[in-house]
């Protein structure tokens, strides 16, 4: 079960360095696309390691359907596109459609309180609706972030046991006030489906989704059942390929327990487009960004992230679970669908990155932006520094006559004006909207990312970059306490090691980077605008860390 969407996410250190392969430019002729994509994938998933099954469809035509790498490392069996993979959190979109089916037949309402179906949920006196659960805006703690989850993955669990893991934990926020990826919400939605339908979650999705869509190779994963074409999953330990850890599938349940292959996922996409499973009107909110109480867009619908790619609207989601990592996306107006299924939870190339590169390659250069001319005096009013979070600032300036955006390291990106107050960068993957106070002074900027939560930046009279703290020496004994593997998401591990008198770290699917000590617990990343702070326990150990990057604070539990 991933967190990220993604690329939440997904996938949070992806801005540090994403190792990779040079991708052909978007100017290449459409006839060469299959070859270009094949070359990208062959380099990303070599023949002697766990691999991936990939499908790329454009306007109903399959451009590529191929396997790469090994399906069974011990036997040397190569991946085939018909092989069955665990989907991880791609499961969530199936759960969302099941809920919409029950709404469409009048059995439930999206505004229903979850306690109507699961009374034991602790809501802190707030009404938590099914919509809150579908959109990750409930504020509930995620059970996959608890110590109990990480130490009991071999055990079959009930819903009651899962809820016990988060009992008495404080809510993150008032329902609807913020966004935070939460597997608990989709586990609860699975319980709603079971109670209302009178069927197990597995039986419901088989009868109401897989069979009508013709998805003959999709099912709820059961480790003791023979599932034709299902392949094993792998991980990476100490630079070597290893068998993935076991997980009882009652733990992910409706948040991440389904299996499928790329052919069935394409059938799923077609069934949704045709209205076979749920009407287009009912499905629309699932692929539309939800909005918070203050009006900000979350970049997430019901089981899908919503954004743009190469100037086209996109709907996408990833998955991560023991032994597997996955990603699928579509650009509806361009008729593009891409699915990448990997049989490793630490693949050499993250499927989110590969799927996005494939999509960008197929879509080519974005259509010309309908820009407008903004008077210089108006642009000068936007120039300045804006604080987005306590740890992130951005700025806008005029350089060489162009209006530009500057990130935390001062790197500039030219912007084009969509209106006198709205601007966008190359690829239209991010937009900035400026707002003024009653005295017509620009005070805030709203950032709209390709996918993810919109953020406000408040204008401040501060330099863009805070003074860099000098490096300090940290005792070897303290550094040794920080060495280990930290889980930031189910398929995203940050491994920390001693490198002489300092630390080095490596994230799943990425090159190693250096950590420079600013204090005994806080380290900045040498290669990117990010920092890591280790949280020490009373006994002197380091059971967790927090990653600070792109204005986000992402916790990671030490798992070994």
Image (cartoon, rainbow, N blue to C red):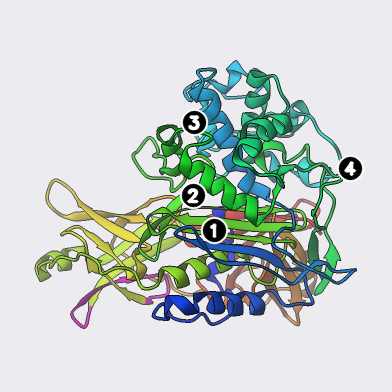
Dot label at residue 131: 3
Crowd rating for badge 1 (residues with CA inside 10 Å; few <14, some 14–19, many 20+):
many
Reply yes or no: does residue 406 show up in magenta. Answer: yes
Q: Gap between marks 1 and 3, in whole Å?
A: 22 Å
Q: On the rendered structure, is 556 left or right of 453?
A: right
Q: Position of residue 148 (x, y in %)?
A: 79, 41
- Mark 4 vs mark 2: give the one in front: 4
- Quadrant showing the C terminus: bottom right
User: Is 236 placed left or right of 134 in the picture?
Assistant: right
Q: Which one is nearer the viewer's eye here, 148 or 240? A: 240
Q: For label 3, count other residues whose C-alpha is less than 10 Å away and answer few (under 14), some (14-19) or many (20+).
A: many
Magenta range: 399-411
| Earlier sequence position, callout 4 versus callout 1 | 1
Residue 329 at what x, y percent from top left? 52, 56
Which SS class for mark 3?
Answer: helix
Q: Secondary structure at mark 2?
A: strand
> Which disc, if any, is residue 7?
1
Name the one closer to the observer, 532 or 352: 352
Q: Secondary structure at mark 4?
A: loop
The residue pinned by badge 4 equals 224
In the picture shown, does residue 430 fall above or below 477?
above
Label 3 to label 2, Cα distance in Å? Answer: 15 Å
Query: Mark 4 packing: few (<14 Cα in 10 Å), some, or many (20+)?
Result: few
- Is residue 335 shown to the viewer in this render? yes
Q: At which x and y percent is residue 477? A: 80, 70
Residue under the image location 79 percent in, 53 percent down = 230
């Amino acid at each position: 079960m991933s967190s990220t969407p993604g690329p939440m996410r997904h996938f949070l250190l992806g801005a540090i360095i994403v190792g990779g392969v040079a991708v052909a430019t978007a100017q290449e002729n459409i006839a060469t696309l299959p070859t270009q994509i094949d070359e990208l994938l062959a380099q990303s998933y070599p023949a002697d390691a766990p691999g991936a099954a990939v499908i790329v469809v454009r306007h109903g035509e399959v451009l590529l359907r191929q396997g790469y790498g090994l399906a069974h490392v011990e036997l040397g069996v190569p991946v085939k596109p018909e092989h069955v993979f665990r989907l991880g959190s791609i499961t969530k979109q199936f759960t969302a459609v099941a809920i919409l089916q029950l709404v469409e037949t009048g059995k439930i309402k999206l505004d229903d309180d979850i306690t109507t179906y699961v009374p034991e949920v602790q809501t802190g006196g707030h009404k938590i609706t099914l919509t809150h659960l579908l959109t990750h805006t409930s504020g509930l703690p995620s059970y996959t972030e608890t110590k109990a989850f990480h130490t009991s993955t071999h055990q079959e669990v009930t819903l009651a046991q899962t809820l016990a893991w988060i009992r008495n934990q404080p809510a993150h926020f008032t329902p609807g006030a913020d966004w935070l990826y939460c597997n608990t919400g989709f586990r609860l939605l699975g319980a709603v489906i079971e109670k209302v339908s009178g069927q197990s979650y597995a039986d419901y999705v088989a009868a109401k989704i897989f069979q009508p869509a013709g998805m003959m190779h999709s099912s709820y994963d059961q480790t003791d059942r023979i599932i034709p074409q299902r392949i094993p999953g792998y991980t990476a330990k100490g630079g070597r390929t290893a068998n993935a850890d076991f997980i009882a599938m009652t733990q992910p349940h409706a948040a991440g327990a389904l299996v499928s292959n790329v052919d069935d996922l394409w059938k799923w996409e077609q069934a949704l487009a045709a209205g076979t499973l749920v009407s287009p009107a009912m499905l629309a909110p699932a692929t539309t960004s939800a909005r918070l109480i203050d009006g900000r867009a979350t970049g997430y619908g019901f089981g899908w992230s919503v954004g743009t790619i190469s100037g086209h609207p996109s709907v996408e989601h990833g998955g991560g679970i023991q032994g597997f990592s996955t990603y699928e996306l579509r650009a509806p107006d361009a008729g593009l669908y891409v699915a990448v299924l990997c049989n490793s939870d630490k693949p050499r190339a993250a499927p989110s990155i590969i799927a996005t590169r494939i999509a960008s390659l197929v879509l080519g250069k974005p259509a010309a932006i309908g820009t407008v001319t903004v008077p210089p005096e108006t642009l000068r009013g936007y120039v300045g520094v804006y604080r987005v979070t306590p740890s992130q600032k951005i700025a806008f300036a005029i350089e060489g006559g162009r209006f530009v955006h500057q990130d935390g390291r001062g790197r500039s990106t030219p912007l084009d004006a969509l209106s006198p107050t709205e601007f966008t960068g190359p690829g239209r993957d991010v937009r900035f909207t400026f707002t003024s106070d009653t005295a017509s002074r620009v005070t805030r900027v709203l950032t709209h990312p390709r996918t993810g939560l919109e953020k406000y930046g408040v204008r401040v009279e501060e330099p863009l970059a805070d003074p860099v703290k000098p490096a300090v020496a940290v005792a070897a004994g303290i550094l040794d306490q920080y060495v280990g593997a930290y889980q930031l998401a189910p398929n995203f591990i940050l491994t920390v090691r001693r490198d002489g008198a300092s630390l080095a770290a490596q994230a799943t699917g990425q090159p190693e980077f250096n950590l420079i000590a600013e204090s005994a617990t806080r380290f900045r990343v040498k290669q990117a605008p990010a920092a890591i702070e280790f949280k020490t326990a009373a006994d002197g150990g380091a059971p967790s860390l927090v990653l600070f990057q792109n204005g986000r604070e992402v916790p990671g539990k030490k798992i070994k």
